[in-house]
Image (cartoon, rainbow, N blue to C red):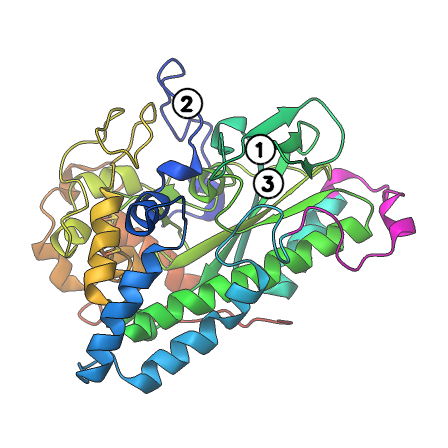
Amino acid sequence: MLSREEMKTDKKTYTVNDELYQRFPVKNQAFAIVSTRDMGEPSYLGFLEKMHQRLAVRMEREDPGFSREENAQDLGANALNLLLGSYGFPNHQFLKWEPLIVPEPLTKHKTKKPPEELTEMVKKTATLYGSDLTGISALDEKWIYSKDMDKPFIITEKGKPKETEEAFYLPKTMNRAIVMGFLMDEPMISNSPELKASTATSFGYSRMGITAVSLAEYIRALGYQAIPSMNDTAMSIPLAVDAGLGQLGRHGLLITPEYGSNIRLAKVITDMPLDIDQPVDFGITEFCENCFLCADHCPSDAISRGEPTMETDYQTGNPGVSKWFVHAEECLKFWQDNGASCINCITVCPFTFGFESMQCFECERCAERDRGCILQNNTQFRVEHGFLKQDRWADRGEILPPRRRGL
Ligand code: SF4
Ligand code: SF4
């Protein structure tokens, strides 16, 4: 069994072709492409309209998993997400780039402490506010969006983060990203693609918003700049990889040693001088090469069965980074036909619930690997550290939620 310390790697966690790679514009995300097509004008969340129309039909028909009560639970779970940040728009709603409640005199004087101490304070406070896993990365400019729906993100030498009529300005001095992971509720996720799984996702988003907004205010009260961010401003998954939270899987999502794929991500970008974490390698790339469970269970056939590649024809993909590209437009079209979002790829990923002996029939190559069965190693790690209860290899493990404090 690898400890977290032993998982740390000095190797580059991404292979990037700098000549090919360009920062990605938000308007090329599947949400924006499908929404803009549906609405006939630039839109980011317009795709929801078709999805909700379909949901109304399924509720009316009383399809299993699409009851009015289940929909009510989903709406309640989503309330704080929509109030705080609506999945994430830069400098919007409560995701403001300026202090919300912190008195101005406090923002003018920085708390002077060594980076090590500040890092510990920030991580403890992120946990207190609701983060289940926190890491810190240097903010790699590659992962900052080139443009929101209509305005560019311009990186400046110094100053404060700000928005004008023309652009969003991010100073280079804001060179740290505090990346936070939020465990989604089990057994709700097991019901994907029904409304219960959507509720787990919605609640994850609400918790992302509460925690990112709260942590940004905490940092501002210590005199530093902070940008709370959900899906906006910069890409959360590569930042999470850089921050050592986990590795990228075939399904295009993060896989963490502690919670597998069952995690949502938010971040706070700051100029606080924080120590950075090291990326980890616990064998996910090798494992995914031989595992196709997410692709097998994807109802829209959106997940690649090939090798990682730098190139893609998908408008939603960004060439220049070696990875498995996901046909995100097809994924979203399935959500619309289904009447609710889908997380099948998260639910079936064996790193979500840990090793079950039946899975050995799915895998034939573990003997070739230096590290033995990567999944069994990770399952032992989770059991040992209290993230999973696994009495018998024959049974599905039980995800043990962390004992949260605070929000
Ligand atoms: S969310 Fe569902 S449809 Fe989309 S890639 Fe994952 S399994 Fe496929
Ligand atoms: S289901 Fe298998 S191939 Fe897909 S991300 Fe999880 S481990 Fe990788």
Q: Of the residues shown, which amino acid type is indicated by label 2?
A: Gln
How crowded is the residue under tag 2: few (<14 C-alpha within 10 Å), some, or many (20+)?
some
State how far apart marks 1 and 2 are (Cα).
16 Å
Q: Is residue 99 magenta?
A: yes
User: Given this view, does label 1 or label 2 mark the residue nearer the observer?
Assistant: 2
Q: Of the residues shown, which amino acid type is indicated by label 1?
A: Leu
Q: Residue furthest front?
A: 40
State how far apart marks 3 and 2 are (Cα).
20 Å
What residue did someone put label 1 on? 139
Q: Of the residues shown, which amino acid type is indicated by label 3?
A: Ala
Image coordinates for residue 57, horizontal then vertical, percent:
21, 76
- Residue 22: numbered disc: 2
Residue located 61% across and 56% down the image: 212
State the SS at label 2. loop
- Residue 343: numbered disc: none
Q: Is mark 2 within 8 Å of ligand 1?
A: no
> Is residue 354 something that shows in the picture?
no
Task: Verify CB contact (< 8 Å) between mark 1 and mark 2.
Answer: no
Image coordinates for residue 255, horizontal then vertical, percent:
36, 49
Q: Where does ligand 1 appear, by image quarter?
A: bottom left
Highlighted magenta segment, given as a residue range: 96-116
How crowded is the residue under tag 3: few (<14 C-alpha within 10 Å), some, or many (20+)?
many
Left or right, 345 with reference to 44: left
State the SS at label 3. strand
What residue did someone put label 3 on? 177
- Give the main secondary structure, helix, strand or loop, of the magenta stretch: loop
Image coordinates for residue 301, horizontal then vertical, percent:
13, 49
Seen in the picture, residue 241 relative to 199 is either above or below; the reply is above
In the rendered picture of this protein, how many numbered marks are placed on residues?
Answer: 3
Q: Is mark 3 within 8 Å of ligand 2?
A: no
Label located before the other in sequence (1 or 2):
2
